[in-house]
Image (tube, grey):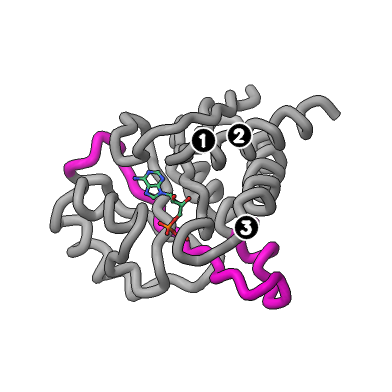
Amino acid sequence: MSARIEVIETDITRLKIDAIVNAANRSLLGGGGVDGAIHRAAGPELLEECRKLCGCNTGEAKITRGYRLPARYVIHTVGPVWRGGVRNEEKLLADCYRNSMKLVKKYRLKSVAFPAISTGAYGFPSDKAAEIAVRTILEEVDIADMVQLVIFCCCNSECRKYHEKVLEKLRNG
Ligand code: ADP
């Protein structure tokens, strides 16, 4: 069965879902933006578990429990810092989505929500990032038969519109 893919505009920490993805940094010890919001909502136990993971390379992903979040798990992935597109940023961003989906499948999760990885402090252009995010997920869900729902969770209307536009474009041909 192919997964339903949705674009919504809300705070990702509020979603009652199997897993939310965190746009973390390589230390996995918390930061600003969505990372800070997830740690605040999950409570100090999340940081305790993250300490044991010994960081994470750019493009890779690691999983923890969700603690006080409504989500059961948090998948921590490290997006690339945008440096004009000449440092392999596009492939590394696709790796984030691909490696996060690998964990979704490994843990047999049915639903997952992604923030717009790298588009905040890391400066990746939002339109380009949305194209990579949607394209990579469409490639992954075909073979991910346990996954029933993938959400792109945006926190502003610009982000939502970019994802909706790409999703429509890629679905129709
Ligand atoms: P990065 O360092 O990967 O750029 P940021 O957290 O700075 O990560 O931003 C990633 C994206 O997450 C941005 O589009 C930002 O607007 C968005 N964001 C920030 N807080 C939240 C939240 N609570 N829920 C969903 N998206 C969020």
Whether 167 is drawn above or below 59: the answer is above
The local crowd at label 3, few if under 14, some if 14 to 19, many if 20 or more residues have their Cα within 10 Å, is some
For marks 1 and 3, the one nearer the N-term is 3
Q: Identify residue type, mark 3.
A: Pro
* Disc 1 residue: CB within 8 Å of ligand 1: no
- Reading the image, the residue beneath label 3 is 125
Q: Which residues are magenta?
A: 68-95
Residue 7 occupies which quadrant of the picture? Answer: top right
* Disc 2 residue: CB within 8 Å of ligand 1: no
Q: Secondary structure at mark 1?
A: helix
- Reading the image, the residue beneath label 2 is 161
Between 163 and 94, the one lying in front of the other is: 163
**Residue at screen point 40% across, 53% down:** 22
Q: Identify residue type, mark 2.
A: Lys
**Residue at screen point 28% across, 57% down:** 36
The local crowd at label 2, few if under 14, some if 14 to 19, many if 20 or more residues have their Cα within 10 Å, is some
Whether 90 is drawn above or below 75: the answer is below
The local crowd at label 1, few if under 14, some if 14 to 19, many if 20 or more residues have their Cα within 10 Å, is few
For marks 3 and 2, the one nearer the N-term is 3
Between 120 and 149, the one lying in front of the other is: 120
Residue 163 occupies which quadrant of the picture? Answer: top right
Residue 60 location (% of width, % of height): 52, 64
Asked whether the residues under the numbered discs 2 and 1 touch, taking CB atoms below 8 Å apart as contact, a structural biologist would say yes
The numbered disc on residue 157 is: 1
**Residue at screen point 20% across, 52% down:** 40
Residue 91 location (% of width, % of height): 69, 64
Asked whether the residues under the numbered discs 1 and 3 touch, taking CB atoms below 8 Å apart as contact, a structural biologist would say no
Q: Is residue 86 magenta?
A: yes
Horizontal placement of 61 versus 98: left or right?
Answer: left
